[in-house]
Image (cartoon, rainbow, N blue to C red):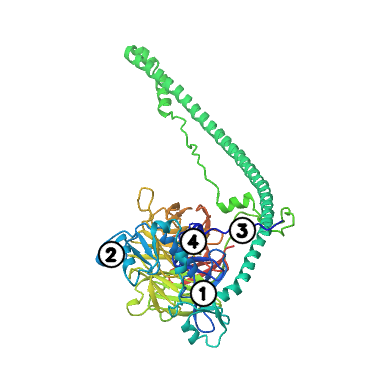
Amino acid sequence: MGEEKQEQPTLTELIETDFLKCKHCNKRYASPVLLPCLHAFCQDCLTTLPQKEVTNGNSRKLVQFQCPLCHSTVTVSKEMSPTPFLQSLCQLHTFKHTSGRTCSYCRFDGKNEAAEALCLDCVDDMCEACTTAHKKTRLTRNHTIAPYNQILNGLFDHDIRNCQEPLCPKHSAPFVNFCRDCEMLTCKTCNAESHRGHSLEQMEAALTRLQPEAKSFVQGLRKRVPTLTEYQAFLKAQLQNLEKTRSEVVEAVKQQAENIHAMVDAHRDVTLAELDKEFSKEEATINGRSKDLDVAKKSLESNAEFLGHLLALGSPPEVLQLHAAIMARLKQLIQMQPNAMTQRLAPSFQPGPASLQNMRIMFGTLDLQRVPINQEEGGPKAKLSISTLLPEPLDPPQLITSIPVKQENDCKEVWPSGLCLRKEKMVVVDRDNKKVKIFDCNSKPAKLTFQFSGKAEHMLKQPFDAVLLENGVVVVTDHEAEKVKIFDVTGKWIGDLEGDFRHPRGIAADNKGQLVVVDGLLLRLTVHDADNGKLVRTIPATDASGNKLLVDPFYVAITEAGHIVVTDHAAPNIKVFSMEGQHLATYGRYGTSASEVLKPYGVCVDRYGQMFVADSDNHRIHLLLPDGTFSKFLLNHRHKVAHPVTLAINSEGHLLVGEAFGKVKVFKYL
């Protein structure tokens, strides 16, 4: 196949193409910078990319980032200079689009005259009058004047390019040589200062020497295009095969969905048939009782009619003759009671735990395996089966250890209002002693390693809850100080979370570097960036009508799915929101029975999405399914749990329960 000759566009054509558009912002270049990978971008666009500062052997400051086009790692000087070739073409493009250009000289006199021409030597815009004067002045009479209407038609493109000589960025002087040792252009001052003794050659000679090599590289690149075209055809065939495979998988998924739908529909029909059967029985019972009452009513009416007529019209002998029968019947009627119903049918439907996780387990798994390009797709792989949709909790849970929180220097009884874990460290907020206590869980039993209360104006006034971040920073809610304070690993205050707080209580961290704080007075949630403490968003926690959903909120937890779980002393006691603020679910009524809570405090979520709620006054821990429905009482007073306040899950999957007055108990529940 013969090589197809690439047609080179003219200069006029080139500057009107996308060649002068930045591949990042898709606009005309503004100070174009050419990267080592030969991809150009606006200087400002490059500054917006994520950059890392590095230094070379000469301690020169450089920046490192990824090219937005080819994604290769680029290391360049921090002071990136525009590329003269692209800068000059952009300037030519600007000259050819004269809209709004005004005379440079008239502006000195405060005038605003439209520019009619451009002096290529001075690079000044001129009106018609100034153009005439420019041609008459001795110093400028030999300058090249280009009318803008002719520039627009491309008549001065090459004249303008000939006047666009790049200057030495260091000395602002014209380049005269090319240094073969340093592979760079030099001016006269450069030659004398830093290139003395180097191999210097005239620019024309250097271009004559280097241009053939560059052209051969271009030809080599163009020869690779057919190979890439062939591979593109191969990829197209792969795409067609992929679409065929996709159709087969889609059909299998749809068939599974239809099978599940059929089973669901069949179970629905059985359930509805059972409901209809019970309704028919109840209806027959009610109708039977109604008929009995109708007979009794007619009997009473007939008796009343007969006795009324007898007493009104009967003679004394006639009345007295029937006296015994009448009295016997009256006694029967007085003692007669309707066959009343003692029970009624009260049907309801309790949906099963139809969580997304359980649905995925039931539906099946999409295996997105990857195989060598020439290997056929394999059949289904053998996989471990899941015996239950959710793990079955131990009954009863096993008490692993009990950690005393009270220390000798505590002035008051311990009230562990906050509890959190990070790897081997456990943080307990002792509200009444105004301390944050940090324990090493690797020790058996866990040992207190450090405690702090803040200093001076950053002293903790009434701490409530805390989170321990990956970097060792402890973030503490202090509702008396109306702040959420940040302390480093030594207990030194390093700042506060941004935002307006009135009674900050519970705080939790998600797996995306965000913190959520619940305010007990403002009745809202705030989301913050864990890295800088900035306020990301405020969640008003309202319903569709704008009514407040929170009444007396205390603690907060975040699920793996990013849902926010809040405990509230007002029923319903558990409220669940999305991270965007949408109200998703509620749970709990006031009381002592199942699904009832007296005083909810701490809440946490395990890796299965199951929720645990501390019901302090009922001395028990509620276990909720991922959809928020009640599962069971995981712990209660029979397990020696008294006034649970705070909850947490450690890295081993054990449940930690912080009790009022001083202990943290660790339970194995799975």
Q: Nearer the viewer, residue 42 or 279?
A: 42
Classify mark 1: helix, strand or loop. strand
Question: Mark 4 and 3 residues: CB-CB less than 8 Å, in contact?
Answer: no
For the residues carrying marks 4 and 2, which lies nearer the camera in this image? 2
Which residue is identified by label 3? 6
| Mark pair 3, 1: CA separation | 32 Å
* Residue 334 figure quarter: top left
| Mark pair 1, 4: CA separation | 22 Å
Classify mark 2: helix, strand or loop. helix
Tell me the kind of residue under disc 2: Cys
Which residue is identified by label 2? 106
Of callouts 2 and 1, the N-terminal one: 1
Mark 4 packing: few (<14 Cα in 10 Å), some, or many (20+)? many
Tell me the kind of residue under disc 1: Val
Classify mark 4: helix, strand or loop. helix
Q: Tell me the quadrant of the picture where the N terminus can be found.
A: bottom right
Tell me the kind of residue under disc 4: Leu
Which residue is identified by label 4? 20
Q: Nearer the viewer, residue 612 or 358?
A: 358
Which residue is identified by label 1? 76
